[in-house]
Image (cartoon, grey):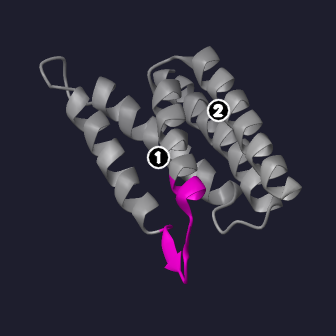
């Protein structure tokens, strides 16, 4: 029964990540719904495993800290320097927050995860409208 609850958490995390990725794909960014869903699902699963599978005596924060490091590495791969500008910073930051959203779901903070997803969508839409005015 617990496996079904954990699986539902991963599905929920995937859904929230896909929402963020949809916004990015809509504006033609390389990391879209699948990428963001994979990041949130993976973060949720790693978090669930660290809390539930490694025993009560283990330091569950170690896995959480390594999620942050791993996503930092993934995000660094999205940043490109072209001529006089840097591209991919928003995508890298988006993947970073997607991992945090997945971790929030994995620890049971469902409302916080949904509210953060909504806030990130607002920020991403505001950022886009600001650049269109120039």
- Disc number placed over residue 12 in the picture, else none: 2
**Residue interval drawn in magenta:** 78-92
- Identify the image quadrant of residue 123: top right
- Tell me if 98 is positioned left or right of 130 in this view: left
Vertical order, 107 against 26 (above or below): above
What element does badge 2 sit on? helix
Q: Earlier in the sequence, mark 1 or mark 2?
A: 2
- Tell me if 55 is positioned left or right of 87 in this view: left
> In the image, residue 75 lies at what x, y percent?
45, 59
Residue topped by disc 1: 42
Vertical order, 66 against 103 (above or below): below
Image quadrant occupied by the C terminus: bottom right
- For the point 67% across and 21% down, the residue is 115
List the single residue furthest toward the left.
57
Q: Is residue 124 magenta?
A: no
- Disc number placed over residue 114 in the picture, else none: none
Vertical order, 131 against 67 (above or below): below
Local packing at callout 1 (Cα closer than 10 Å; few below 14, some 14-19, many 20+) is: many
> In the image, residue 21 lies at what x, y percent?
69, 52
- Identify the image quadrant of residue 77: bottom left
Tell which of 33 and 3 is nearer to you.
Answer: 33
Tell which of 104 and 124 is nearer to you.
Answer: 124
Vertical order, 51 against 77 (above or below): above
User: How far apart are labels 1 and 2 at the CA level?
Assistant: 12 Å
- For the point 51% across and 56% down, the residue is 92
What element does badge 1 sit on? helix
List the single residue furthest toward the bottom.
83
Tell which of 109 and 12 is nearer to you.
Answer: 109
Local packing at callout 2 (Cα closer than 10 Å; few below 14, some 14-19, many 20+) is: many
- For the point 45% across and 31% down, the residue is 103
- Tell me if 49 is positioned left or right of 34 in this view: left
């Amino acid at each position: 029964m617990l496996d079904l609850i954990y699986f539902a958490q991963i599905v929920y995390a995937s859904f929230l990540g896909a929402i963020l990725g949809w916004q990015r794909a809509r504006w033609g960014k390389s990391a879209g719904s699948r990428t963001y869903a994979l990041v949130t699902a993976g973060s949720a699963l790693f978090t669930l495993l660290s809390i539930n599978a490694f025993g009560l005596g283990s330091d569950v924060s170690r896995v959480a800290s390594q999620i942050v490091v791993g996503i930092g590495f993934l995000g660094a791969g999205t940043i490109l320097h072209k001529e006089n500008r840097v591209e991919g910073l928003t995508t890298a930051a988006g993947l970073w927050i997607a991992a945090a959203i997945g971790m929030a779901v994995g620890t049971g903070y469902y409302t916080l995860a949904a509210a953060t997803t909504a806030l990130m969508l607002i920020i991403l839409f505001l950022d886009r409208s600001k650049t269109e005015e120039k």
